[in-house]
Every structure is written in structure tokens, then in C-alpha cells.
Image (cartoon, rainbow, N blue to C red):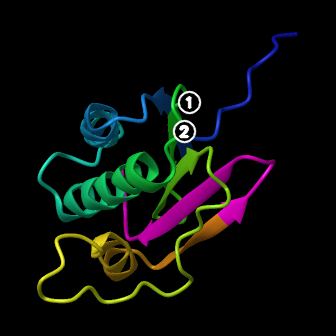
Amino acid sequence: MHATTPPQAPVTVRVFCQRFSATRRGARLARLLALHQLDAWGVPYGARASEEAGAVVAELASNAVLHGRVPGRDFELRLVLDGTAKALRVEVTDTRCEERPPAEPERAGDEDEGGRGLLIVAALSARWGVTEGPAPLKTVWAELDGVTP
């Protein structure tokens, strides 16, 4: 009698998770590594999905550094690519749960130098939000549809 190994189902969910220093350099590195990881998963550099994901990662990482920074604590980037659902979830976790972004991003004035990050995230993602806990953590997440490896 010969034992056979059942065929394995293809991998449909891929996960990348990395901690970064809560600095501008850490935020830039998060974006670069996210783009590199997406390329390794089959979402090539320069593709629309890659560019949009890179912009979302850049904005969420920047917000974690600017508004969620606690000296000596890192922020975490997590990417979940679901090939079956053709969706990418971007999560950025920081250690300032009392600093929540507004439920609806507000439009910045013409003279304001910042304040457009969450508008960009809302425009590029199908859904976004904030998950709290456990204290002192909060995760700002965004889901992008139509991302296929």
C-alpha cells in the first residue's frame, strides 16, 4: 500500500509584520519595505495597487510618528494580503490610544501645511478605521480592494 500526500491548497493569505522606530526615518522605511514586500508577493512596483498601498502606508506611518509617538516605543506595520478576496489590509499600531484620529477626516485649509493624510487614506481605501487596545495600543487600519498578487 502506498501512502499519498493530499495536494496542498495554494497560499491565499500572506502576512508581513515589522516594528519600526517612531521617527520620520522609520516611517519612510515602513513605506519602502511595504512596497518591497508587495513586489515579492506579486504586486509589482509602479502598479496602481502598489502606489496606492504605498501612499496609505506612508500616511498611517507618518501619523503614528507625529501623533502616536511615545519616546522609546516603536510603531508596528502589518500587511495582510488576501488573494482570494483580492484585498490588502494595512494596519499601523502605535502606543498612544488617547490620540485617536477623527471618525471623519476634516478638510485642511488652503494655507495649512498638514492635515490631509486621513483624507488621502479615505480616498484610496474602501474602508478604514481605528481599533483600540489593549491599552496603551491603538491600530489605525485601511483596506484596499482590487489588490491581486
Label 2 Cα crowd, 10 Å radius (few <14 / some 14-19 / many 20+): some
Q: Name which quarter of the figure residue 118 lies in.
A: bottom left
- What residue sits right under mark 2 in the picture? 70
Q: What segment carries the magenta color?
A: 131-149
Residue at the location (33% across, 80% down)?
A: 119
Label 1 Cα crowd, 10 Å radius (few <14 / some 14-19 / many 20+): some
- What residue sits right under mark 1 in the picture? 73
Q: The disc labelled 2 sits on which kind of residue?
A: Val
**Label 2 element class:** loop
| In the image: residue 13, left or right of residue 62 | right
> Does 51 sit above or below residue 92?
below
Return the x and y of residue 121 as percentages of the image width and height: 36, 72
**What whole-number distance in Å separates the C-alpha atoms at marks 2 and 1?**
6 Å
Q: Is residue 104 magenta?
A: no
| In the image: residue 51, left or right of residue 72 | left
**In this orientation, does residue 121 appear?**
yes
